[in-house]
Image (spheres, coloured by chain):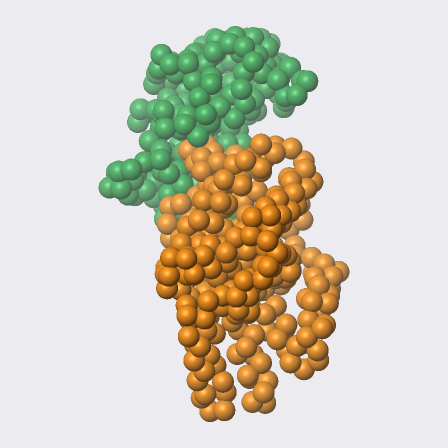
Chain colours: A green, B orange
Amino acid sequence: MLQIKEIDVYYGAIHALKKLSLEVEQGSIVTLIGANGAGKTTTLKSISGLLRPKTGSIIFKDNDISKVAPEKIVGLGISQVPEGRRVFSTMTVMENLEMGAYLRKDKKGTEEDMENVFTRFPRLKERRKQLAGTLSGGEQQMLAIGRALMARPQLMLMDEPSMGLAPLLVKEIFSIIKDINERGTTILLVEQNANMALSIADKAYVIETGEIVLQGNAQELMNSPEVKKAYLGG
Amino acid sequence: MLEFIQQLINGLSLGAIYALIALGYTMVYGIILLINFAHGDIMMVGAYVGFFSISLLGSNIIVAMVFAMVTCALLGVVIEKVAYRPLRNSTRIAALITAIGMSLFLEYVTLYFLTAQQRVYPASAFPLHKYEIAGLVISNKDIFIIVSAVIMMIILQYIIKRTKTGKAMRAVSLDKEAAVLMGISVDRIVSITFAIGSALAAAAGVMIGLYYNAINPLMGIIPGLKAFVAAVLGGIGLIPGAMVGGFLMGILETLVSGYWSSMYRDAVAFGVLILILLIKPTGLFGKNTGEKV
């Protein structure tokens, strides 16, 4: 579904991604794990079009999207749940969800999807008229996921959904991710919490200073001594 | 007491005009953090478009106002595209200096083509009537200005609060990158913001023509600056703040003229700016959130 082929991305003079290649198969959960500053968020931003690769290509369903304007990418079927949630703080929960469906014209389908989000996250339904900035961290994460779902994405990019959440909530969020995937959405998940990410992923990539250093079946990587040592705390 | 109420009434129509101009400043600032110093001059262009549509085409005041609003909406969009968009990612001071340049450009192009001669707003467009109610005098001009300004503000509030585009405007002003991830085109939203802000300024321009009876190519400078003070007073970037700030500035100005001397009204207006910046730089309605990271 998604193939990143040898992209080079720069932040000014900093060479952030070096000939990075990565593949996401339809229906799977792929995770990209690595330390802070390794290039995980940069990879997602490149897919969403917020950053432009200098070389290489990003193929989504047979089309190169590496030069498509960022606001068009979501219309192609790729939604991102950004790092730090980035909900619109002084807008209500409902308004945030409406923004997720900004490009959609089918009013009925949009309303149905909002009901679906509310069924999945009953707490958001209770707070639907509340400003997003007044929600707890976990609720904001749910809102950010719900907002991305409102676009009916085929591929969902998730940037550190566990960040800053209590362990119990992290578990909940990951079971939600698994559930979203089981209902047909392909997921590319970026995480520092390697343990959790590997436990739900099919395939995994390990990134270090802008390069993929390891890749393979998530189960195998979980048991590999190198990954254990570097990312799973021994 | 009666005189005080009379002064308040006089201040309301001037305040409504300032509020309309202040809205444009504040909306543009909310979206791209630019103080559009050409905004007062867009108001001046609106006053001229209104003037010519009355004097040359013989249109009535409402048609003239709509005509001015549409023309200036286009002008605002073009100015943003040509002058500000190429500088979107450069320093804020570069854009600010460009805005001052654009302001001078509009003033002197108008001076060149229309000369510095004052033009009197045709009285035929709006025959003056004064009404006396319980010892208070109010003119049909004041009523027209206040009512049409309030209608425009209600429409604006509706757009911002209820429509998809208005919500997208708020989303862009809160977090551009997240808005882009929703599929919102920031360029399109910026254009719409300039169109709305400039249209409101044009309406204010026609109202100033009615209020002072005369227009000239440099008429945008002082009301523009005062409306900027109004926007800062209410909290720059906040729409209700601009409305309240505008009315407060208008009322303050008429009170100063009425009870003290009209010579001091400009000094007082800018004194307010200095005071606000010293005491509460975020304005009356602004929360102290610090710089966004």
Most foreground residue, B253 or B30: B253
Q: Is residue B139 above or below residue B214?
A: below
Residue drawn where x is 41% and y is 70% of the image: B124
Spot occupied by residue A72 in the image (x, y as percentages of width and height) = 41, 27
Spot occupied by residue B141 in the image (x, y as percentages of width and height) = 46, 73
Spot occupied by residue A177 in the image (x, y as percentages of width and height) = 41, 29
Spot occupied by residue B97 in the image (x, y as percentages of width and height) = 68, 42
Q: Is residue A176 above or below residue A230?
A: below
- In this picture, residue A145 sits left or right of residue A7: left
- In this picture, residue A204 sits left or right of residue B164: right
Could you tell me which quadrant the C terminus of chain B lies in?
top right
**Where is residue A231, by image quadrant?**
top right
Most foreground residue, B173 or B147: B147
Residue drawn where x is 58% and y is 32% of the image: B86
Residue drawn where x is 50% and y is 56% of the image: B48
Most foreground residue, B229 or B262: B262
Could you tell me which quadrant the N terminus of chain B lies in?
bottom right
Using the rendered image of the protein, determine whether residue B95 is visible from the camera's viewpoint: yes
- In this picture, residue B139 sits left or right of residue B259: left
Using the rendered image of the protein, determine whether residue B152 is visible from the camera's viewpoint: no
Residue furthest left in the image: A108
Residue drawn where x is 49% and y is 85% of the image: B137
Most foreground residue, A105 or A192: A105
